Amino acid sequence: MSYPCPICHKRFEPSEDVTCGRPKYYPFCSSRCKMIDLGAWLDADYKVVSKVESDAPEISEDGF
């Protein structure tokens, strides 16, 4: 079964790594695409957004 890489969109068949028994770079097709994705997370290109509760206490600029 082939899957599209979320970075380059190339279709690939995941090959299993003999050391751990699961696909080596899945869901990516290669180490390169895996590192591109990590770089995007580290550069804050991706964000996880959550709803702020209105009854939560406000935090001042000094963090307290």
Image (cartoon, rainbow, N blue to C red):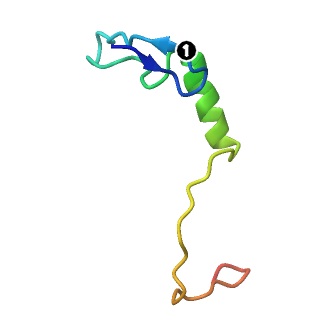
- Write down the residue under mark 1: 10
Q: Position of residue 44 (x, y in %)?
A: 68, 47
Q: Position of residue 40 (x, y in %)?
A: 66, 37
Most foreground residue, 49 or 9: 9
Count of marks overlaid on the render: 1
Which residue occupies the extreme left position in the image? 21
The residue located at (66%, 79%) in the rendering is: 63
- SS of the residue under disc 1: loop
Q: Position of residue 15 (x, y in %)?
A: 36, 9
Quarter of the picture containing the N terminus is top left
Q: Position of residue 5 (x, y in %)?
A: 51, 22
The residue located at (56%, 55%) in the rendering is: 48
Q: Which kind of residue does numbered mark 1 sit on?
A: Lys
The residue located at (73%, 80%) in the rendering is: 61
The residue located at (52%, 86%) in the rendering is: 56
Quarter of the picture containing the C terminus is bottom right
Horizontally, residue 18 falls left or right of residue 8, namely left
Q: Is residue 11 above or below residue 44?
A: above
Q: Is residue 44 above or below residue 60?
A: above
Most foreground residue, 17 or 5: 5
| Number of other residues with Cα within 10 Å of mark 1, as a class: few under 14, some 14 to 19, many 20 or more | few
Horizontally, residue 17 falls left or right of residue 38, namely left
